[in-house]
Image: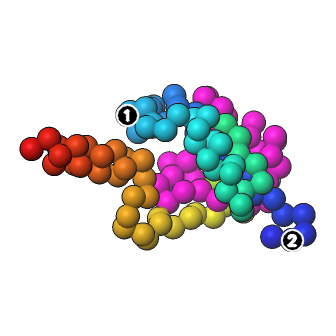
Amino acid sequence: GGDNARLVVIIAKDKTVERLKGSRPIIPEDQRRALVESLKVVDEAILGYEDMDMLKVIEKVKPDIIALGYDEEQIEEKLRKLIAENNLAIRVARVDRFKEKNLVSSSKIKRKIIENYRRNMT
């Protein structure tokens, strides 16, 4: 970005994660938001809307670029359609999955804790 570039990250609400993934997130939304906002490259992290109203978020943030996670195919399709329908000058990009094999997701962390617990119980 340029001199005025800012990175604003939208954090999915717990109910949204549960609806999309079938289970509640391990780390609660307020903690996920605080964790992401503490990253040096992030200027602001805000919670999304439960109804996933992307236009509401776009109007609030006014982005030039929207970067989606590697696993957000459904959202990308809807977002591109919304951008086209509203004639918005916003670029959509996808972020690749993190290549590191170690604990990079809360689900992997949970599995590792369970494995260690079971191993220590025997």
Identify the magenta region: 48-77
Circle number at residue 55: none
Q: Give whichever of 108, 52 is nearer the camera.
A: 108
Q: Is residue 83 left or right of residue 114?
A: right
Helix, strand or loop status at disc 1:
loop
Q: Is residue 94 left or right of residue 86?
A: left
Q: What x and y, as percent, mark residue 23? A: 38, 33
Q: Give whichever of 92, 87 is nearer the camera.
A: 92
Residue type for callout 2: Gly
Q: What x and y, as percent, mark residue 15? A: 51, 28
Residue type for callout 1: Gly
Q: Residue at x 71, y 41 (%)?
A: 46
Q: Residue at x 43, y 70 (%)?
A: 99
Q: Earlier in the sequence, mark 1 or mark 2?
A: 2
Q: What x and y, as percent, mark residue 45? A: 71, 46
Q: CA distance from mark 1 to mark 2?
A: 39 Å
Give the residue number, with chain letter if any, for mark 1.
22
Marker count (numbered):
2
Helix, strand or loop status at disc 2:
loop
Q: Is residue 79 visible?
A: no
Q: Is residue 34 left or right of residue 90?
A: left
**Crowd around label 2: few <14 · some 14–19 · many ≥20 (10 Å):** few
Q: What x and y, as percent, mark residue 17? A: 49, 36
Q: Residue at x 51, y 52 (%)?
A: 72
Quarter of the picture holding the N terminus:
bottom right
Quarter of the picture holding the C terminus:
top left
Give the residue number, with chain letter if any, for mark 2.
2
Q: Is residue 89 magenta?
A: no
